[in-house]
Image: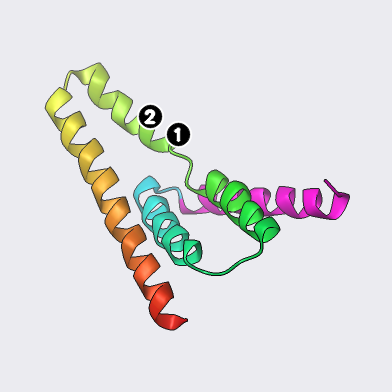
Amino acid sequence: MNKKYLLTFLLTAYCATFLRFYFKNNFVISIIGSFLYGFFISRKISKSKKEILFSGFFACFTSFSGFVHFLYQFIIQGYYLKLFIYLNVIVILNLIIMYIGFQLSRKIT
């Protein structure tokens, strides 16, 4: 692994983390990240750029640690049905948004 690749990877991860803390809304971050992930997954990108984008940017930007804390609050309060509903809505909505990004990217190319 060369130094330029590693530096690019680290800077990309740093920028994604910075953006994540700038928005401070897990739902918005999740929607944006899912859309962009779907958009870029259908693009023809070199292997190294794909690694940097998906492992560096999206892994830091769309971290589910914020949702884990949010859903953990339901467990503590005993709202298990609410936990089940929210978790499924989050996953299904993100998959739909990712699919929309994927389809939009395919129409552009």
- Considering every residue shown, the one lying at the far left of the view is 81
Q: Quadrant of the N terminus?
A: top right
Type of the residue with mark 2: His
Distance from the alpha carbon under mark 2 to that under mark 1: 6 Å
- Considering every residue shown, the one lying at the far right of the view is 3
Q: Which residue is mark 1?
A: 65
| Residue numbers of the magenta segment | 1-23
- At a point 46% along the width and 62% down the height, the residue shown is 36
Q: Along the line of sight, which residue is nearer the eye, 7 or 43? A: 43
- At a point 60% along the width and 47% down the height, the residue shown is 55
The answer to whether marks 2 and 1 mark residues whose Cβ atoms lie closer than 8 Å is yes
- At a point 48% along the width and 61% down the height, the residue shown is 41
Q: Quadrant of residue 87?
A: top left
Q: Which residue is mark 2?
A: 69
Can you give x and y, in whole percent of width and height, for residue 11 in the image? Answer: 72, 52
Secondary structure under the numbered disc 1 in the rendered image: helix
- At a point 17% along the width and 18% down the height, the residue shown is 78
Answer whether residue 5 is magenta in the image: yes
